[in-house]
Image (spheres, rainbow, N blue to C red):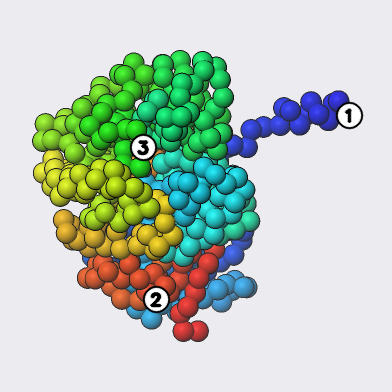
Amino acid sequence: MLAGVMAAAHAPAVAQAPSPSIAGNSTTLFENVRIFNGKNAALSAPSHVLVKGNTIERISAAPIDVTAEPGVQVVPGNGRVIMPGLIDMHWHAMLVRPTPAMLLSSDIGYSTLLAGAEATATLMRGFTTVRDMGGPSFSLKRAIDEGLLPGPRIYPSGAMITITSGHGDFRQLSDLPRTIGGMLARVEQLGGSMIADSPDEVRMRVREQLMQGASQIKLTAGGGVASPFSPLDVSTFTEAELRAAVEAAENWGTYVCTHAYTSAAIQRSIAAGVRCIEHGHLMDDATARLMAEKGIWLSTQPFLDLSGASALGPAEQAKMRQVVGGTETVYALAKKYGLKTAFGTDILFSQELAERQGAMLAALTRWHTPAEALVMATSTNAELLTLSGPRNPYPVRLGVVEEGAMADLLVVDGNPLENLDLVADPDRRFLVIMKDGKIYKNTLPQ
Ligand SMILES: [Zn+2]
């Protein structure tokens, strides 16, 4: 008996191992499709794409003969476009549907079921991979990987790490003062965010996320819209605290991203070794130049109106207005300095808003051609995912349609390189959705 308990205690930690694939041994042939491969601005000539298991095995202009192989599923494309599954680099799988009040007052079981339903909806919008930028998404990720429910591949950050009063501290004034070594706040108990006020505390919280399988670490380096006591202009962590997080993450082979709108928060992050800035809407020219010089990633979002704060109060909406005012600036600076720019949506607290995930991608046509936007949301985003190095739970090629890459594929009705609005209408326009070599939707005429 004791031996059995000891053996269980020493079982290998699944949290940090590469995640399983549920594709099995099925084979699918997409006939007569024109390929947007995630990189080129032009479609291929009519082609045939053979998927075996979860991998794109062969792409050929000549027909591929599968008559010798039993049980092959043939998908007739009839000249339609096939493209890589979309990637959202700033997603909060656990926080999309509930309001903050609902989240903090209900138990994690209900929130997780909501998140499960949302994960399926996310996949059905054509997003086959998301990078989760804060929230207790480890169990959801595991359930999706095990095939328990359909959803996107999740790169989890775990709890986002913040300071007292920083973005992610959802306590009320009546919760203060916290006793040293005292109770965790509700949001900490849920794993939504962790409050850390010294390099030592930061290190511990970072390592706890890594222990649970975080593929990257998220800190909030400045104020945020949704938090009640963090003005947008403030810088939160000290450089030493940020550096403690960077060291702990790099010791584990991965990287830190910081939530940062202002130049001060961004510059301090860069000085501490942060590799990826989330948002950046309030940065100035010199900061953008610094990001270019240092090769820092910009993971930003086209916030165009106040809808992102619709579930929040007037003070938060005022902050949202300021951020929206910076959207033109951040995209212009990214273009001016050729910043490595990832696409994400950061949709929070509303199922209705989540339905606009594809519309936010389509909104990039204000600054980019459809092809540029689609490259960003596929192969460029996938490049940023590889920064997780040995902590990458999915060490496969994502975001491209190439031989040897992961079979995350969409068949589109229409040409998204000519009309990006198609991605905003996934119910009608995404006729086939394949993830991990498995078809989750097929409404092609049979
Ligand atoms: Zn966020």
3 or 2: tag closer to the N-terminus: 3
Say whether residue 296 is visible: no
| Residue at (42% x, 29% y) in the render | 173
The answer to the question of whether label 3 and label 2 lie on touching residues, with beta carbons closer than 8 A, is: no
Q: Left of 172 or right of it: where is 143?
A: right
**Badge 1 density bin: few <14, some 14–19, many ≥20, Cα 10 Å:** few
Instruction: Give the number of the disc on residue 428.
Output: 2
Establish if 404 lies above or below 256: below
- Front residue of 436 and 229: 229
Position of the N terminus, as image quadrant, is top right
Q: Quadrant of ligand 1?
A: top left
> Mark 3 or 1, which is nearer the eye?
3
| Residue at (30% x, 56% y) in the render | 307
Establish if 254 lies above or below 144: above
Establish if 136 lies above or below 245: below
Q: CA distance from mark 3 to mark 2?
A: 39 Å
